[in-house]
Image (tube, rainbow, N blue to C red):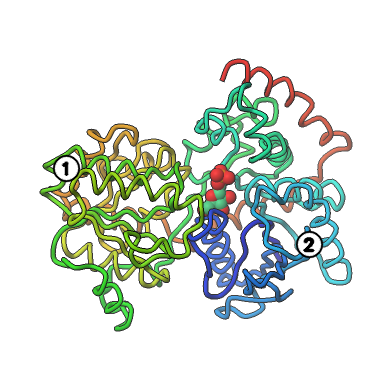
Amino acid sequence: MRIGFINPQGNFDRQDSYLTEHPDFGGQLVYVKELALAMGRQGIDVDILTRRIDDPDWPEFSEPLDDFGELGERVRIVRLPFGGDRFLAKEQLWPHLPEFVQAIEAFYRPASWPDFFTAHYADAAAVAFQLKQRQGKPFTFTGHSLGAQKMDKLGVTAANFEAMENRYHFSKRLAAERQGMALADTIVTSTSEERFGQYGHRLYSGAVEPDDDSRFRVIPPGINSRIFNAEEASDSKSDRSSVLAQVPHPNEPHVVVSSRLDPKKNVAGVVEAFACSPGLREAARLALFVRGTDDPWTDLGRLGEGERQVLMPILARIEAAGLRDRVHFLNLNSQRQLACAYRLLGRSGSVFALPSLFEPFGLAPIEAAACGLAVAATRNGGPAEIFADGVGELFDPESPADMAAALERALANQQALAASAAERVAERYTWEQTASAYLEVIRAGLDKPPPAEGEIEDVNSELAARLDAYLGQP
Ligand code: F6P
């Protein structure tokens, strides 16, 4: 069996170049790569279909065919040209997706088509929808992050809609998501909160019913346990010395934050929790993992404008609160260094904090927990399910006092929390389990009849009215 993964945005390479350095190089790329490799290990042929980028600023993505080394051609990265040569952010890809559909058709015309597609994010849903219409190919839809929730969080209203639309192209994204929801053989969510809470948004009504069991399957993602584990022996000498060089107090407890510098990740919230809580300042230091600069106080390095906008007020707040000697910045260059830092800090009684205003799933705290850190996380989104039953501390990300209290509890109870979080991860979150669940869904989907004539056309006839109602009453 061959499975095609559709992932127009970002890109893939053996080194995971740019991971977490750019908004399109985040959790979704890890998800697609790890799931593809886990399927490959189960004997399935996989093609990851993505964009060919021939841009001197992004030199890793110009080869049409590539792989991850590990399984050779069993799991291929297939880069197809569309939208020109230069790197384009995901928001800029919309007008070029029909060209991607044609490129996929041209690629498979002489070869044999995948039996099934998995579509990742709204842009892939638009492509999978076309392929189903044109080629009758079945697909699963995995949203990763849905536009309606982003609109809620950004406070989109009639007054700012035009500006938001110009930047984020929400109407295209919602239309594509609705197509994916309506036509996918199965919609895969990471948690049931995602299924009921997010797909139940009024902007999706008419496209899918969240309580329709025949349409959904909750499949949590896993972690790469070859990298994220609690074995000290996994650390290479060079990773350990590079981490130690950046942690001046390796034996003291830290609150560890490893989020992208994006306003929705709310890194500023943790700094605020430290600023407002003498108890927290006393109990731990703050380790902020920021890729792209060795010392943000003197050099903003390779950070982009958006990241600088997030970091500057954080630096100002640290300074104003007199926290400079309690906050340490780490610039880690690989997943292995990240895991090494987690292990080191886990041994000194540290806690991983995920302060996002909303987090659709929350892979990072699972990775941290596998390495021995206790977890305190936002109660908005996936973490509430993953770290339920007292396996982690949950907090309101918009309340620095609540966050500080949760972090203090986690620090006080670090050993027990770290042990129960590690146990939960081993039990539920491995890519082997994720791949097996996808394959179950895919095998069942292969037996389903193709969509009936006309079934597809009307998915978005109600969208304009729903959008008007939303903008009238956000
Ligand atoms: O991890 C980064 C990422 O998963 C992207 O790859 C994904 O598409 C994105 O986050 C979702 O973000 P947004 O909802 O802001 O478009």
Tell me where residue 160 sits by quadrant: top right
Number of the label disc, if any, that sits on residue 185: none
Specify few, some or many for label 1: CA neighbours under 10 Å numbering under 14, 14-19, or 20 or more: some
Give how far apart the Cα atoms at labels 2 and 1 are: 52 Å
Q: Amino acid at mark 1?
A: Arg
Residue 407, relative to residue 419: is it above or below? above
Residue 101, horizontal then vertical, whole percent:
81, 55
Q: Which residue occupies 12% across, 41% down?
A: 278
Residue 416, horizontal then vertical, whole percent:
17, 52
Q: Which residue occupies 74% across, 47% down?
A: 94
Q: Which residue occupies 19% across, 50% down?
A: 323
Q: Is residue 403 left or right of residue 303?
A: left
Tell me where residue 230 sits by quadrant: bottom left
Q: Which residue is mark 1?
A: 409
Q: Are the residues at dot 2 and dot 1 in contact (C-beta closer than 8 Å)? A: no
For this orientation, the residue located farthest to the bottom is 237
State which mark lies toward you, 2 or 1: 2
Local secondary structure at mark 1: helix
Residue 363, horizontal then vertical, whole percent:
43, 53
Local secondary structure at mark 2: loop
Q: Which quarter of the rendered picture does the N terminus lie within?
A: bottom right
Q: Is residue 420 left or right of residue 145?
A: left
Specify few, some or many for label 2: CA neighbours under 10 Å numbering under 14, 14-19, or 20 or more: few
The front one of 22 and 99 is 22
Q: Which residue is mark 2?
A: 84
Residue 256, horizontal then vertical, whole percent:
28, 55
Q: Which residue occupies 34% across, 47% down?
A: 354
